[in-house]
Amino acid sequence: MPETAENTRRRRVVIGLGNEILSDDGAGIHAVRELRKSHAGEAEFSELAVGGLALLDQIAGYDVCLIVDALRTGTHPPGTILRCLQTSGGEPHALTSSHQIDLAQVMALGALLGAAMPPSVVVWGIEAEDITTFRPHCTASVARALPRLVEAIAAELASGGDADPSPAGRWQVVHETVPS
């Protein structure tokens, strides 16, 4: 069969992680919902309240994977947008719990099991202010930054979802908010 744009198109997924009823912890879910509205044909979109080993089934079979999540580094003001390229980074090692597995280990385990894994995963994060209060919306600082996060991810999708040559495993600040 001759190659066409349709049969050579790479499978892409954008996964929003978090709990939407725990204030800023829902930022990844909120961002994915916005992206789905305007970019439905460019990727598949998924919402998950779990990470670790549960991600294996969610990323297997895709060529490009973007994950969106809230994070707490404590080194940036709330609403700061960060990006990290993650690669498998080696062989998985013995675990005593599936909760101990990180994304690189998920990718390596998938490859070891023969699953078609993306060569890398781009993780988009937004610095959270509050991830423990039961509230169905984000704090003001994170809510203000969400449109910028959605724009940045949309731009990456528009470029084909190819990860740039940034160093793997290092968070890069994409947009830093000014503390209020």
Image (cartoon, rainbow, N blue to C red):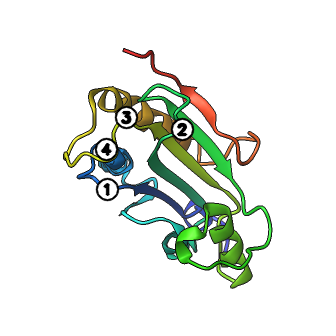
Left or right: 34 in relation to 75: left
Label 4: which residue? Answer: 34
The earlier-in-sequence mark between 1 and 3 is: 1
Image position, residue 70 (x, y; %)? 43, 45
The earlier-in-sequence mark between 3 and 2 is: 2
Q: Nearer the viewer, mark 2 or mark 4?
A: 2
The answer to whether the residue labelled 2 contacts the one labelled 4, judged by CB atoms less than 8 Å apart, is no
Question: Closer to the camera, 155 or 103?
Answer: 103
Image position, residue 98 (x, y; %)? 55, 76
Label 3: which residue? Answer: 129
Q: Nearer the viewer, mark 3 or mark 4?
A: 3
Q: Please identify the quadrant where the N terminus is shown.
A: bottom right
Label placed on residue 19: 1
Q: Can residue 35 be seen?
A: no
For the residues marked 2 and 4, what is the alpha-carbon distance in whole angstroms? 25 Å
Please rate how many residues cluster around mark 1, counting C-alpha atoms within 10 Å: few if below 14, some from 14 to 19, many from 20: many
The kind of residue on which mark 3 rests is: Glu
